[in-house]
Amino acid sequence: MKKLLLTILCLASALPAAAQEVAYEEYDLDNGLHVILHQDNTAPVVVTSVMYHVGGKDRTEGRTGFAHLFEHLLFEGTENIEKGKWFEIVSSRGGQNNANTSQDRTYYYEVFPSNNLELGLWMESERMLHPIINQEGLDTQIEVVKEERRLRYDNSPYGQILPVLGKNLFEKHPYKDPNIGYMEDLDAASLEDVIAYNEKYYVPNNAVLVVAGDIDMAETRRLVDKYFSEIPRGDQIVRDYPVEDPITSEVRSTAYDKNIQIPASIVAYRTPGFKQRDAYVLDMISSYLSDGKSSKLYKKLVDDQKQALQVGAFNIGQEDYGMYIVFSLPVGETPLDTLVTEIEEEIAAVRTDLITERDYQKLQNKFENRYVNSNSSIQGIAGSLATNYMLYGDTELINKEIEIYRSITREEIREVAQKYLKPNQRVVIDYLPEPPSEN
């Protein structure tokens, strides 16, 4: 009996978790605002969120960091929300809210008890229609962003890695500059610059509104129309970013960080944008190489050969181009070039050999679980719906994206590694402690 029970438990644990299909409705208002509604009445919670198709890459030379600045600036207040009261209003109604910005989009959201649905919609409509943007608020938020840059980038160990990657992987595309911007650009930002930026990007035809949770669909449609339908459409946004020349020979670079004592090795490749099928395959390759202690790079460099304190492969997805990086920290006096050589040996194996059937099944199980977990909460569902519509152009990915991963073959994994992860297409960065000054 015990053996039978153990067998049943083992079989059950091997089965992929079943994801319930996410039902939703979507439509457009006359002003171009795309609306997505998802009803789930299992808990008295509602998410109101707006994603704007504006991120760090949307800037002119000398004016970097505006999208991130606006992540802060649009909490300053509106014609009907007093300065500094946004968070107080939300928390006093039992809610929480936040925002985040990437190189490609900005996302604002509130999570409320569902009897505050109308409040959440009103606040987001106020942010879109009636923001107060004045010199006082601009000066305040520029200082907030500059301090954030000091804490997270300038004075944080390994905080310069993403800016260094951008600078080395891109020469023309705005991804070459950090999402948070440069200090001198923030200092140079004028009130006129900022007002023009708001009028261009924070408009209904450049946004998606997602309402998810304990809602009545008809009533929610009525409220959406009440608060958003009269917001004026903005001008059509034209994006024409420069195309990068291919990397055809290895690039070597050195960067210094005053905040570290242990150097790091970074091997990086420029890869396709996240909408491309190859980007999904690269996700699987990164998981195969470094996800968990049994992964190829971790087991080899950390456990067996004890050459690295840490090692990780990451496919950093972006809309126009991705960044595939392998980051490692050496043990003791292990040369960084040794880590690069050992890492290349494992990547070369992916380029030349099929991964084993057992490893392939492990990957499939991991991605099944990730897929289920990403949509296990109302907040997760709201974020997925917004992202899939705005950045991927396909809301239904929330239900079918797992099929893409399921359809990836071992042969395809090898082909994609051969296509993008070759030594002549890589950037190798020695990320070092800052040398002592010569005094």
Image: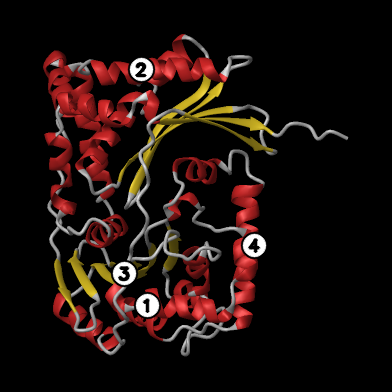
- Secondary structure under badge 3? loop
Residues packed near mark 3 inside 10 Å, few (<14), some (14 to 19) or many (20 plus): few
- Give yes or no for contact between labels 2 and 1 (Cβ–Cβ under 8 Å): no
Tell us which disc is closer to us: 3 or 1: 3
- Secondary structure under badge 1? helix
Q: Is residue 412 left or right of residue 170?
A: left
Residue at image mark 2: 346
Residue 63 drawn at (x, y percent): 54, 66
Tally the marks: 4
- Give yes or no for contact between labels 4 and 2 (Cβ–Cβ under 8 Å): no
Q: Label 1 sits on what residue type?
A: Glu
Residue at image mark 3: 238
Residue at image mark 4: 184
In the rendered image, the residue lying farthest to the top is: 305
Residue at image mark 1: 124
Name the N-terminal-most of marks 4 and 1: 1
Residue 181 drawn at (x, y percent): 55, 58
